[in-house]
Amino acid sequence: MKRNRPWVERIVDRLWVEITPWLEDKEPVPEKGESGGSVSGTMSWPGACRALAIDKTWSSRGFRRRRAVREVVETLAPVDGRFFATWLKTHGPHWLDDPRVRAAAEWGDPMKAPAILLGTSHPWSPSSLRYLAHAVWLMKEGYVQRGGRVIEIGVGFGGLAAMLALVADARVTLIDLPEVVAAAQSCMKDLGLDHHLLEARTAGREDLVVSNYAFTELSVALQDSYIEEVLRFSGRGVILSNAEVFSRGIGGRDNRALMAALSAAGIPVREWADAEIIAPSDRLCRNTLLAWKS
Ligand SMILES: C[S@@+](CC[C@H](N)C(=O)[O-])C[C@H]1O[C@@H](n2cnc3c(N)ncnc32)[C@H](O)[C@@H]1O
């Protein structure tokens, strides 16, 4: 569902898109990854995570200002940030001032949008607001219970995992490329949240599997292996799908094909295109939510 964007929104986001590259840390650019089968696996992103967590040539300071990181996970602009902040003010305002949440939001030193644009009392990275809002929404809708278990596929640097640990006291299994898992583990450790991490294992009926902007960037073969090994055992699932952006380019599944594959595996998936957590940029990109609860 597209909508005409007010000109103020267009200008604010355009300014962000034009100005923030000047503030990026561009050098050195890690070598591109060789992990086929996914969009970000062949970018400089896995190398950035390796530099942080394995070679330790980079520190977390400025990590989220690196171009190799920004192009994969720091992708939102202030209009989305304001959308998530507004939603949080209704559904969990105390989290916006919680010191541990704010520490998680600031891990990796992201670029922050001014408070006045977001309508908050502090500046925030728009992506950090997304992680927080998604965690609060997953709890509000009963996809994760307090102290519950979550398996996240495509964890990025661990932004959502950290927020789920703080908001829901969740225990999280991180699934991603090895160097990316190492980066997310080091983020959780820095935040004193590593006791929330669970070893890789098979899902159970009580588990939530979540994958935002990640499962739908994978090849059909990789999706099939996760469906076979993880998703079909999970009682609940939420996939924030950007398949409309990527599926054609990577020869992957569009939303219809993905829902057919999930249904064929016995997963009672439904599309929830008007879920309240779908942000303005999601609508522009025709992103949607695929979810199940059994
Ligand atoms: C666009 S990022 C989204 C990250 C995070 N979910 C977020 O919302 O910020 C896509 C993620 O998919 C991960 N990915 C790439 N190949 C993967 C694979 N084979 N298995 C699991 N995750 C993979 C990338 O490393 C990256 O962390």
Image (cartoon, rainbow, N blue to C red):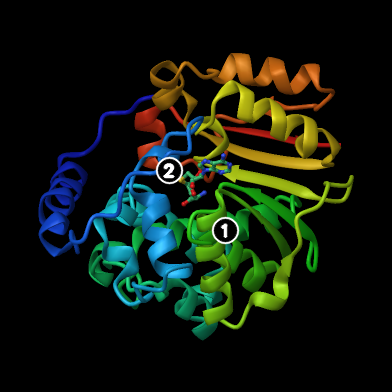
Image quarter hosting the N terminus? top left
* Residue lying at 76% horizontally and 61% vertically, measured from the top left: 199
Q: Give the answer, above or below, for where 156 lies relative to 251.
A: below
Amino acid of disc 1: Val
Q: Where is mark 1, residue-wise?
A: 181
Q: What is the quadrant of residue 5 in the picture?
A: top left
Distance from Cα at disc 1 to Cα at disc 2: 26 Å
Q: Give the answer, above or below, for where 72 lies relative to 144.
A: above
Local SS, label 2: loop
Please state the horizontal and vertical placement of residue 75, each as a whole percent of the image: 33, 49
Q: Name the disc covering residue 279, or none.
A: 2
Whether residue 2 is visible: yes
Side (left or right) of 253 relative to 105 = right
Side (left or right) of 253 relative to 109 = right
For marks 1 and 2 on the same chain, the one whose residue lies earlier in the sequence: 1
Please state the horizontal and vertical placement of residue 14, each as a whole percent of the image: 14, 45
Image quarter hosting the C terminus? top right
93, 130: nearer the viewer: 130
Please state the horizontal and vertical placement of residue 204, each as a whole percent of the image: 88, 47
